[in-house]
Amino acid sequence: MTSITVDQDTQAKLDKVDQAVELRDETGRLLGYFAPAVDPSDYADVDTGVSEEELDRRSKAGGGRTLREILADLERRQ
């Protein structure tokens, strides 16, 4: 991914953003979209309701379907 460095004024505006926004030039032309970076610590205390042991068990159990199988099933449903 290409990186663009913004000036301090633009950074100050983007620092206030708490959700995805459109970026437009002075004429109103859409330049693109900006989504602020997520701070993982915001979710550190979230309880998923699934223990680490259960996640390990599910991972080792295998099973499930391949992407190809899922896509074929979706095609049949149309």
Image (cartoon, rainbow, N blue to C red):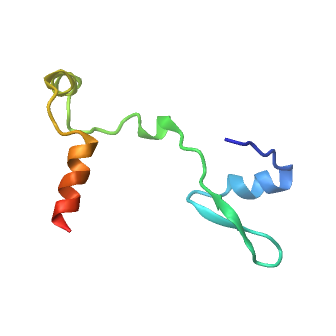
Q: Nearer the viewer, residue 23 or 1?
A: 1
**Position of the N terminus by quadrant:** top right
- Residue 24: % across, % down: 74, 70
Q: Nearer the viewer, residue 9 or 57?
A: 57
Q: Is residue 76 above or below residue 4?
A: below
Q: Nearer the viewer, residue 21 or 28?
A: 28
**Total count of labels:** 0
**Quadrant of the rendered structure where residue 44 is?**
top left
In this image, 19 relative to 67: left or right? right
Q: Is residue 27 above or below residue 3?
A: below
Q: Which residue: 26% across, 39% down?
A: 48
Q: Is residue 49 above or below residue 11?
A: above
Q: Which residue: 72% across, 42% down?
A: 2
> What is the residue that sits farthest to the bottom in this orientation?
27
**Position of the C terminus by quadrant:** bottom left
Q: Which residue: 22% across, 58% down?
A: 74
- Residue 51: % across, % down: 20, 28
- Residue 58: % across, % down: 17, 28
Q: Which residue: 80% across, 70% down?
A: 25
In this image, 17 relative to 59: left or right? right
